[in-house]
């Protein structure tokens, strides 16, 4: 019995808890992609960089706050710096829209052209980020590292296996829940949110109803910038900030958005968790888990790891391909924003 | 002079003209119907009045005011409501949200207008929380008309409101449209079901190849042997 509990704790510690926080980060990222897709109707390749851009400003503001001696007690100072990152990112994406995408909207460009333009924006942002903060790893986490650590858990329970909960994991999940709740309230309850859904549902009819497309587009960018900054900051706090990692995040984020059905916010969230859990479950070494659950002679000698962690991006790819082959509209098709 | 009139309209979607010297007008509280064979430019004439295509010649007047140069959106603000033939509801949104979006340009309290729409189409009140995409064809058309009524328009333009609905539902819809006209709204509609439409029309326009062929009261057109022979199937 105790070995079974140990097995569960082991899975919780190395699989469920990390996947929950990683999934929340992906979900917030995928929400931004989905929002832009349903309002502007293109896949925004610059989304990973938007996350990095927002996080960069959060880090800069965090350093400034730290130099002033400001801290947020046990919580990371970066949370106080979030508004700065959000505002900087909002201004930047609105400027990009004015300078780049607006031109293509006026020329009624096809969505492939928009997508390629967003690749261009991605490279520009890429450059700006490396100019400002450099390509290296940045640690900006401060405050209390653990809610409770492995040693404390062992003392409380007397188990061999330990469960440690990091502050960032809890912050990630809680923030994601709050942000998603606000977003859904906005989309379903407010006039502006409903007009966004109407515009995404039927552009022509929205125009006939007097909905101003410029306003809808502006709001979509503002929300996307906020979501991207929060997602990027949470990811950076949980792991670390390295511009290149954010570029790579684009793949699982796109996979999450597509798995859930592009344009559907509920799908984006579900997709985020599907990708996160698959990625971690497939690269997890199960040997110890089998040692707790199986009789000795059945326990494998190797790590019992399906895929090396180097291949974690392949998991997103495979899921993406399978979904596109089997159910191209995604798991939650039929409902838009 | 009619309340709303498109006078001597000539134009098309770029390229060749579809309408030539076509005139269509409607009075407040009356129903005007545009009928004619396929490709006669019926929908085009209506779109021209709503500003969805550029006129080379002619003008559109509403209540004596020249609105020829206004965009469709600006005409909505002026009091025109338009129900397109297809994709005329927000399928992913509930019936009530569809009506709310119809009233988007209004800043005042819309609950009274919504009550009126629900009184007109009681089934919509029952289905108010259901996504419009899940409704039957006839119910969808009611949502579409209701959405357009939410701005409290002076003119309501309907592009084939009975396309694809059963004859019973068609009669029902026509009854509702008559009720709407009685409230003083001018109604202009394009119809495939010429006979039934002319029956309820105060005024009928028979278009052929983008030109006015016959213009008369609905009753007179129904009794005109030539119109009967050529357009109403005897």
Image (cartoon, coloured by chain):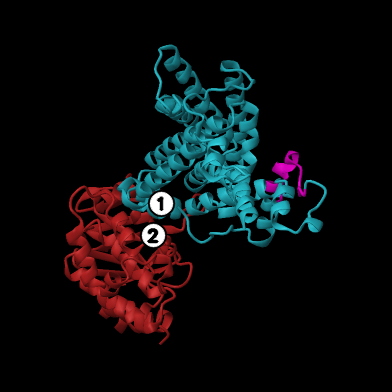
Chain colours: A cyan, B red
Q: Looking at the image, which residue is at 50% across and 45% down?
A: A31
The answer to whether residue A319 is above or below residue B162 is above
- For label 2, the SS is loop
Residue A315 among magenta residues? yes
**Camera sees residue A110:** no
Of A276 and B157, the residue lying toward us: A276
Question: Is B230 left, or right, of B198 in this rendering?
Answer: right
- Dividing the image into 4 quarters, which one contains the C terminus of chain B? bottom left
The quadrant holding residue B171 is bottom left
Question: Where is mark 1, residue-wise?
Answer: A197
Percent coordinates x, y for residue A58 in the rendering: 47, 24
Q: Looking at the image, which residue is at 39% across and 53% down?
A: A198
Callout 1 and callout 2 share a chain: no
The answer to whether residue B49 is above or below residue A127 is below
Q: Label 1, label 2: how many angstroms apart (C-alpha)? A: 8 Å
Do callouts 1 and 2 mark residues in contact (Cβ within 8 Å)? Answer: yes
Of A49 and A11, the residue lying toward us: A11
Question: Where is mark 2, residue-wise?
Answer: B93
Percent coordinates x, y for residue A292 in the rendering: 69, 53
Of A52 and B169, the residue lying toward us: A52
The quadrant holding residue B180 is bottom left
- For label 1, the SS is helix
What stretch of residues is rendered in magenta?
A304-318
The answer to whether residue B17 is above or below residue A165 is below
């Amino acid at each position: 019995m105790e070995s079974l509990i140990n097995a569960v704790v082991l899975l919780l510690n190395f699989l469920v808890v990390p996947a929950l926080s990683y999934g929340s980060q992906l979900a917030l990222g995928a929400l931004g992609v989905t929002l832009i897709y349903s309002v502007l109707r293109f896949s925004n390749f610059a989304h990973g960089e938007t996350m990095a851009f927002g996080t960069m400003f959060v880090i800069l503001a965090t350093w400034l706050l730290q130099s002033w001696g400001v801290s947020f007690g046990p919580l990371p100072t970066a949370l106080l710096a979030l508004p700065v990152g959000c505002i900087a990112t909002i201004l930047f994406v609105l400027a990009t829209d004015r300078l780049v995408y607006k031109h293509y909207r006026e020329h009624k460009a096809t969505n492939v052209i928009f997508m390629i333009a967003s690749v261009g924006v991605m490279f520009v942002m890429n450059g700006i980020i490396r100019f400002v903060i450099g390509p290296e790893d940045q640690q900006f986490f401060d405050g209390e590292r653990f809610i409770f650590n492995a040693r404390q858990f062992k003392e409380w329970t007397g188990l061999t296996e330990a469960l440690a909960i990091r502050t960032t994991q809890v912050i990630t999940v809680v923030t994601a829940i709050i942000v998603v709740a606000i977003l859904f309230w906005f989309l379903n309850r407010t006039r502006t949110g409903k007009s966004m859904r109407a515009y995404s549902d039927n552009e022509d009819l929205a125009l006939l109803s007097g909905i101003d497309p410029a306003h809808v587009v502006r709001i979509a960018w503002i929300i996307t910038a906020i979501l991207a900054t929060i997602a990027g900051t949470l990811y950076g706090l949980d792991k670390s900030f390295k511009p290149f990692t954010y570029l790579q995040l684009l793949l699982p984020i796109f996979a999450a958005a597509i798995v859930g059905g592009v344009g559907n916010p509920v799908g984006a969230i579900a997709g985020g968790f599907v990708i996160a859990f698959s990625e971690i479950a497939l690269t997890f070494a199960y040997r110890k888990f089998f040692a707790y659950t199986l009789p000795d002679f059945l326990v494998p000698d190797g790590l019992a790891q399906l895929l090396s962690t180097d291949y974690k991006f392949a998991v997103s790819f495979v899921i993406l391909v399978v979904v596109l082959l089997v159910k191209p509209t995604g798991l939650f098709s039929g409902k838009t924003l | 002079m009619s309340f709303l009139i498109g006078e001597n309209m000539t134009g098309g979607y770029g390229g060749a003209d579809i309408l030539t010297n076509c005139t269509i007008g409607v009075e407040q509280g009356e129903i005007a119907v545009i009928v004619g064979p396929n490709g006669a430019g019926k929908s085009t004439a209506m779109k021209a009045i709503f500003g969805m295509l550029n006129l080379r010649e002619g003008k559109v007047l509403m209540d004596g005011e020249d609105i020829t140069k206004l965009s469709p959106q600006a005409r909505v603000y002026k009091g025109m409501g338009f129900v397109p033939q297809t994709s005329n509801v927000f399928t992913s949104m509930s019936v009530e949200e569809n009506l709310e979006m119809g009233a988007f340009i209004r800043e005042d309290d819309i609950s009274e207008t919504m009550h009126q729409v629900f009184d007109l189409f009681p089934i919509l009140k029952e289905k108010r929380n259901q996504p419009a995409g899940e409704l039957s064809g006839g119910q969808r058309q009611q949502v579409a008309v209701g959405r357009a009524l939410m701005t409290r328009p002076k003119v309501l333009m309907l592009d084939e409101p009975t396309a694809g609905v059963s004859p019973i539902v068609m009669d029902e819809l026509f009854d509702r449209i008559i009720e709407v006209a009685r409230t003083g709204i001018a109604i202009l509609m394009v119809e495939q079901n010429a006979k039934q439409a002319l029956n309820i029309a105060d005024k009928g326009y028979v278009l052929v190849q983008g030109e006015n062929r016959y213009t008369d009261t609905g009753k007179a057109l129904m009794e005109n042997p030539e119109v009967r022979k050529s357009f109403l199937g005897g």
